[in-house]
Amino acid sequence: MKTASLLIAACTLVLGGCMTDRTKSLFNPPGIHASDDDTSAAAKSGQIPVTQYYEALDKAKDKKAGDDEIPELVDKGIGLVSAYCLRWFQRLDDAQRRLAMQQKDFNIIRDLGTALLGIGGANSTIVGSYGALNTAYTGIVDNFNEAVLAGPTTAKIKAQMLDMLKQSETRLRCDADSLSFSQAYARIELHADTCTYNTVRSLLDASLSATQANRDPKTGKITSERAESSYQFDDSSAKLRDFWRPKGVVDSGNQGKLTQWLADHGLSSISIPFFINTAQYAPLRAAAVKDLTPKETPCQDG
Amino acid sequence: MPGRVEVIRDVPAEQKARIEDDYRSVGATVSWAIQGNGRWTLTATFPPIGDAGGPGAGAD
């Protein structure tokens, strides 16, 4: 029992312990300015944005709008916020991968323990236990490989967050020359508030997709695209649906043509069912029918 | 994390199955809510961009 516990603890430490330190992570390369030694050059350089910001803050605190020190403070503030945000996402990424691996390894660690207990209690054959041990160990390695490839959600939110920061940064830089110290101070705080847990939480709650999120740089309000309309199914709807799904089966060629038509008319963000079934697009449906469906020719006698 | 959402109000009950089938064919998840007037509101949720599906995509 004691042997099993020790071995399980050792496995967990070897595979998991070295991932808790950003400088020794197996999931990501070391951060360029990360070090667990505070006296190292890397750790000192990691403090540069902090030092520069507080120096600029000290110089700007007695200045008025239009003085050079205020845009300098804004510049250093933006630099510090960006550095903090990126480092936060690096730690989040490591943590997410570590968590994914730990969850998957729970059963494997238990199997490993069972196999070892089998040896200690002499209830199983040595060969059988050895096989279980090998299987469990192989499982841990496989799950580590999977964990390295995990983390798309973090990457997606990070891209969205950096885009929001960029929007906020552009606005702040444009306004920097006209801000007083107190206004600049408040705007830097609001800018820093973009990259927070609450914003990430809001992104998730609002179910925003990667390219459709916007954050108002002044109010901090996050908005996403949401299409809403009342139902309407007219003659053009019926023709387009028959073009898209003749006899209820999707015609992939026609689907491609309809999708392209929507894109050509600036409607790539809505789905085909929404286009066909809503009052909002009734006027455009007639045009789509005219462009896409076969022309009816009048019957000619003789 | 779900993606983009489309909402269609005032859907007659007899059209529910057809519209739901249309949305499922493009990879959306569909839910329904009854309105006070006896008609239905559809909410279709697409996978986030980068995953399978999405508005304009076909699931087949």
Image (cartoon, rainbow, N blue to C red):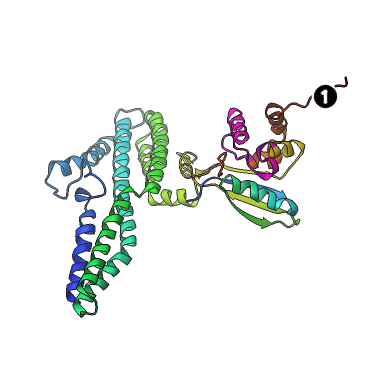
For the stretch drawn in magenta, the main secondary structure is: helix
Q: Quadrant of the C terminus of chain B?
A: top right
Q: Quadrant of residue A247?
A: top right
Question: Is-magenta flag for residue A196?
Answer: no
Residues B37 and A171: in front is B37
Say left or right for A272 vs A70. Answer: right
Q: Do we see residue A194 in this rendering?
A: no
Whole-percent x, y for residue A181 in the image? 34, 36
The residue under the point 17% across, 47% down is: A35
Residue A255 on the magenta segment:
yes
Establish if A293 lies above or below A241: above
- Choose between A84 and A182: the one closer to the eye: A84
Tell me where residue B5 appears, x and y as whole percent: 57, 46
Above/below status of B33 relative to A29: below
Q: Nearer the viewer, residue A152 or A291?
A: A291
Amino acid type, callout 1? Pro
Q: Residue at x 37, y 34 (%)?
A: A180
Q: Which residues are magenta?
A: A243-272
Viewer-proximal residue among A204 and A140: A140
Q: Position of residue A240 (x, y in %)?
A: 70, 36
Report the residue at 17% width, 73% height from top: A3
Residue matched to label 1: A298
Q: Quadrant of residue B35?
A: bottom right
In the image, taking residue A111 as reference, residue A195 lies left or right, namely right
Q: Secondary structure at mark 1?
A: loop
| Residue A164 visible within the image | yes
Give me the residue at 76% from left, 39% from top. A234
Which residue is at the far left?
A39
Q: Chain of mark 1?
A: A
Q: Position of residue A85 (x, y in %)?
A: 32, 44
